[in-house]
Image (spheres, rainbow, N blue to C red):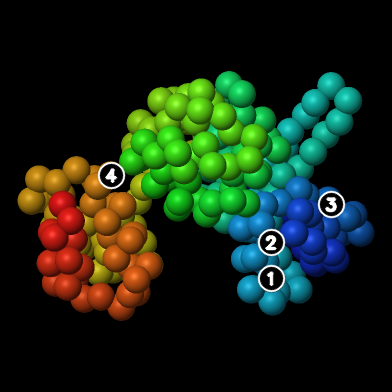
């Protein structure tokens, strides 16, 4: 199993990236999410996390800027009816966080709004993945929902709200929403604002 490819960025398009390492150019299929992150990074030497798909007549590398996106991709393709291309479309339509939020909040309509996803598939994604997304598991390298974040305020607020008896998925969803609106909340402000919605 390939973990990552590290090398020189040769070509970048919204659907694929070519990375050269030791004279070999690797073509990796990517989502718009990864494309955006690579473009923002402005790096010439990049590390792309890999998911290797072997078919009867082909071998494909799917590339991801973060382990988190790759973990979500791995979970999505474990669901019957969701192939690698569909999972890539999902991660191009929504961010990894938005996919997780939609699964946790059982937002069938949001998942169904993605091209190629019908009502039954959307329900299956939620049914099969909700517990895995909350607890972490399957092919996920790290716990998908993690309190260990760069944002210490979020981590401390999460701990405090858990102690108060609120459910982790609900807390995570609200904290993410608040931090999207304003990313420099103090711990106290985060807890106070979160309590308005819990």
Q: Which residue is depicted at the point 84% across and 64% down? A: 11
Residue 7 position by quadrant = bottom right
Which residue, given by chain and number where applicable, does mark 2 sit on? 35
**Element class at badge 1:** helix
Q: Nearer the viewer, mark 3 or mark 1?
A: 1
Give the mark nearest the N terminus, 1 or 4.
1
Q: Which mark is residue 132?
A: none
Q: Which mark is residue 39?
A: 1
Residue found at the very far left of the displayed protein: 164
* Neighbours of disc 2 within 10 Å: few (<14), some (14-19), many (20+): many
Q: Nearer the viewer, mark 2 or mark 3?
A: 2
Residue 93 is left or right of residue 20, and the answer is left
At which x and y percent is residue 82?
Answer: 61, 29
38 versus 105 height, above or below: below
Which residue, given by chain and number where applicable, does mark 4 sit on? 169
* Neighbours of disc 4 within 10 Å: few (<14), some (14-19), many (20+): some
**Element class at badge 4:** helix
**Element class at badge 3:** strand
Q: Which mark is residue 26?
A: 3
- Asked if labels 2 and 4 touch by Cβ distance under 8 angstroms, the answer is no
Q: Which residue is depicted at the point 18% across and 56% down? A: 197
Give the mark nearest the N terminus, 4 or 2.
2
Residue 34 is left or right of residue 149, and the answer is right
């Amino acid at each position: 199993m390939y973990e990552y490819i590290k090398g020189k960025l040769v070509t970048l398009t919204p659907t694929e990236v070519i990375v050269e390492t030791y004279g070999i150019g690797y073509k990796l299929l990517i989502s718009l999410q990864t494309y955006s992150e690579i473009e923002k990074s402005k790096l010439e030497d990049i590390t792309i996390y890999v998911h290797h798909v072997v078919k009867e007549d082909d071998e494909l590398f799917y590339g991801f800027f973060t382990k988190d996106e790759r973990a979500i991709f791995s979970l999505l393709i474990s669901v019957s009816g969701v192939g690698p291309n569909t999972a890539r479309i999902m991660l191009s339509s929504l961010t990894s966080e938005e996919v997780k939020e939609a699964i946790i909040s059982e937002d069938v309509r949001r998942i169904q709004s993605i091209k190629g996803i019908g009502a039954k598939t959307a329900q299956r994604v939620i049914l099969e993945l909700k517990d895995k997304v909350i607890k972490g598991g399957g092919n996920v390298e790290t716990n998908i929902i993690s309190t260990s974040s760069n944002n210490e305020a979020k981590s401390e607020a999460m701990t405090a709200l858990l102690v108060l008896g609120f459910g982790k998925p609900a807390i995570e969803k609200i904290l993410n929403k608040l931090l999207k609106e304003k990313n420099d909340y103090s711990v106290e402000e985060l807890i106070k604002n979160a309590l308005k919605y819990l």
